[in-house]
Amino acid sequence: MIRLTELAHERWRAVLRPGDTAVDATVGNGHDTLVLARLVGPTGRVIGFDVQPDALFAARQRLDDAGFLDARLYFDDHRKIAEFVTGSVRVVCFNLGYLPGGDKTVTTRRESTIPAIAAAASILVPGGVLTVIGYRGHPGGTEETDAVREKLNSMKEFAVEEIPGGESPTSPVLFVATKNH
Ligand SMILES: C[S@@+](CC[C@H](N)C(=O)[O-])C[C@H]1O[C@@H](n2cnc3c(N)ncnc32)[C@H](O)[C@@H]1O
């Protein structure tokens, strides 16, 4: 299976520059947050959201251990992205589903994911990239991924690519939406 997380990282790497601002809408254990922090560097900003305190604690530890003390992590719903984030943002990422190694009943849900994607789209600069990895192997995952596809394809100011992670109907999917110039 293609590693969709690594494909997403490649897409961030292609657009992010030192000093940029990036948003991790689903911080979890902070693996993606750390990749973003490295790409924007000490002059950039990374802002993250999660609804599980344990996840944010693990992520904060990971960032601190790597020397990134300035990342701003919020214990809040990613629907509030546009309220917390000011200025120009070049990348927003969502890695949906449940926290690996955590409580599998706490998953992202389309009721919040779709408004959060709309909020993320509003803060991206032209040329900015929104990546969403959807998982279809858990209850509600396929419906959420389908709703993400529909939402992204309805956003006319974005060019949307869809990259499946395998042949199976339950394989994860990476969406890459690039905001038009
Ligand atoms: C697949 S995990 C993210 C993994 C993470 N990117 C990493 O590198 O470890 C999905 C995360 O989304 C979080 N989440 C669920 N609903 C959320 C919401 N409404 N707002 C923000 N985060 C949410 C979960 O708590 C979980 O930690």
Image: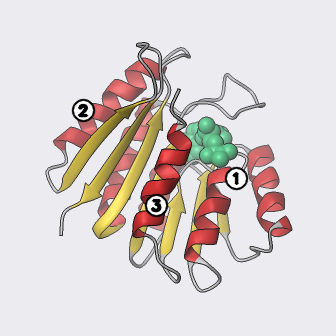
Q: Is mark 3 within 8 Å of ligand 1?
A: no
Q: Position of residue 37 (x, y in %)?
A: 63, 69
Q: Amino acid at mark 1?
A: Gly
Q: Determine whether the residue tagged by mark 3 lies in a helix, strand or loop.
A: helix
- Residue sitting at 56 percent across and 80 percent down? 44
Mark nearer the viewer, 2 or 1: 1
Residue 74 can be seen in this image: no
What is the image's colouring?
secondary structure
Disc 1 versus disc 3: distance between alpha carbons? Answer: 16 Å
Taking the spot 49% from the left edge, 74% from the top edge, the residue there is 21
| Structural distance between the alpha carbons of marks 3 and 2 | 23 Å
Q: Say which amino acid is labelled 2.
A: Glu
Which amino acid is tagged 3? Trp
- Callout 1: SS: loop
Query: Quarter of the image holding residue 125?
Result: bottom left
**For the residue with label 1, is its CB less than 8 Å from the closest atom of ligand 1?**
yes
Residue 114 visible in this rendered orientation of the protein:
yes
- Tags 1 and 3 touching, CB below 8 Å: no
**Outermost residue toward the left?**
156
Q: Which residue is mark 3?
A: 12
**Which quadrant would residue 24 be assigned to in this image?**
bottom right
Q: Is residue 131 above or below residue 20?
A: above
Residue with the mark numbered 2:
150
Residue at horizontal 51%, vertical 62%?
23
> Which of the numbered marks, if any, corresponds to residue 30?
1
Give the spatial CA distance, label 2 vs label 1: 28 Å
Label 1 or label 3, whichever lies nearer to me, is 3
- Name which of mark 1 and mark 3 comes first in the sequence: 3
